[in-house]
Image (cartoon, helix red, strand yellow):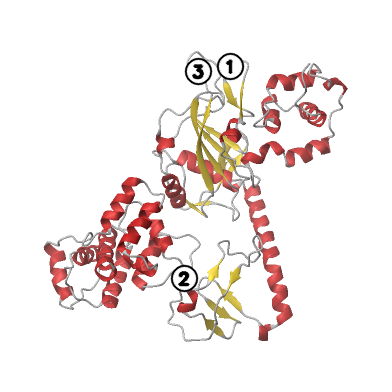
Amino acid sequence: MGKRSITDTEIALIKAMLGRKMKNSDIQLYFNRPDRKVNSGRITGIGNGSYSNSTAIVAATQSEVDAFLANPPALTPAGSAQPDDNPLSQANIVGYFSKGSDGVWRLGGGETDRCECKANFGFKHQDKWLRAIAALANNAGGLLFFGVHDKDTKGPNGEDWSHAVGGLDSGEFADADPADFSTSVKAMFDPTPVFGIATATVDGKTIGVIHVQQHASRPVIAVKQVGSIKEGDIFYRYPGQSSRIKYSDLRAILDARDAEARAQILPMVEKLLQLGPARSMVADLDSGMLTDGGRTLQIDKALLEKLSFVKEGQFSEVEGAPTLRLVGDVTALETDGKPANHFGMLTRAHILEAFLDQTHPNDPTDYIRFALEVGQNERLPLHYFAGLAGMSRDALVAFIDSTSATPIKKKRYIDWTKPDAAFHAAVGTPKGYLTNILAGNLPAVTSPTVAGHIGQAIQAMPSDATFDLPILLKLLRECLAVGASTSAESFLRRGICRIDELSFS
């Protein structure tokens, strides 16, 4: 007999799990490794004593089994991976599959609260896999496999294809830009689930894999309706299914979040009590304001540009780095009511607002990168942010080319950096608005239709036009407030881009 690959401790656990009437396929999940497969036959052999010296090994106690199931080492690749372990490596992915006696490769353990299978993939019906991502993020994280059959799937001759590797029937998953996944997930959920994607080859067939991390700020909530997903839905991964969360599980998430918040803020409260109200103030990291309830200090915009904030924004230290580091002097001053903002997640609305308000973000290149890697091919002002970053047009083109956007998207945005790229001649009503605007007679923004006409008029501004930039930006801001989320918004974005290239290119 060859050298055993299963330890005595593992045999004892397997015997106890069989004593609990657990299925062989469920037990497999806990003992399969990338470098070692534990098939159903071996588990049966341990149960009936035919495997090695399993008869002489005493089954583990119930408390030992409970402790093992609470923290199973086999689940590490689908949960929080170790620093030197990539959950999306080919070896780790293949390690989840094993070849059965019928010659078919299957997902070991099948679908669990950490693994879900989809026979195919498509962006057309994305609600099917979006809900699975949210469900895994709201539980303990895990893996979503595409090209792997669901439970009880039958082959053409009635054979069992449960959890069998079938492979993807198209290249839509493999050929998709990672930004396409990111755009769909960001638009669907808040907070945004953290995930990674990869493809792997199992039994000569290509499968797609999405690894989802447990979200640190659960619950992840749907913000709009798409297919079977409704606004406000909270999904949770249960063994074998991703469904709307039960009250008890939601209560547990909220209780854990409250406990963590109390643990994070307690050191601050203790420090405040130690210092006393005369020597302490509270900082609002969004508005840049310091207050003790009576006095208020506003951090100067010039200083806000130089502040360094860690990404997590928590009341604790992360890997030894201070949560907030101020460089410079903080002084009291009169505020104009529009403190500079710092966003946890950038959106296209932030880009437009930053341009219209002429704010100076900490890293203006983030705004350019967003347009390329997350934006949906819409026109956004880039010259202003390139200027803040000290980029010439050639440097801007080089930066665009260095992003992870698709070649087609890169070419489109490079073309949009050329002189007069946003210009489009006005006709009809917009042409009349343009004449009035150039004459200094600003129209009243009374409806989305008027806002759209103003956007078309500004898009037709001639290259030699003279205008008062602050006044025109104020007009565009009024138009956007009226025309946002309507057909006028596209014209307004183009008008904004025209002002951007006339003023900052």
Q: Quadrant of residue 321?
A: bottom right
Quadrant that contains the N terminus: top right
Question: How busy is the neighbourhood of tag 1: few (under 14 within 10 Å), some, or many (20 plus)?
Answer: few
Q: Out of 264 and 365, give the one closest to the viewer.
A: 365
Residue 228, position as x, y percentages in the image: 45, 41
Q: Residue at x 70, y 83 (%)?
A: 276
* Location of residue 464 by image quarter: bottom left
Q: Residue at x 27, y 71 (%)?
A: 503
**Is 349 placed left or right of 59 in the picture?**
left
Disc 2 designates what residue?
A: 341
Type of amino acid under label 1: Gly
Q: Residue 382 location, x and y as percent?
A: 33, 62
Q: Is residue 374 visible?
A: no
Spatial CA span between label 3 and label 1 = 14 Å
Neighbor class of circle 3 (other Cα within 10 Å; few <14, some 14-19, many 20+) is: few
Q: Secondary structure at mark 3?
A: loop
Q: Nearer the viewer, mark 3 or mark 1?
A: 1
Q: Quadrant of the C terminus?
A: bottom left
Per the image, the residue denoted by label 1 is 103
Local packing at callout 2 (Cα closer than 10 Å; few below 14, some 14-19, many 20+) is some
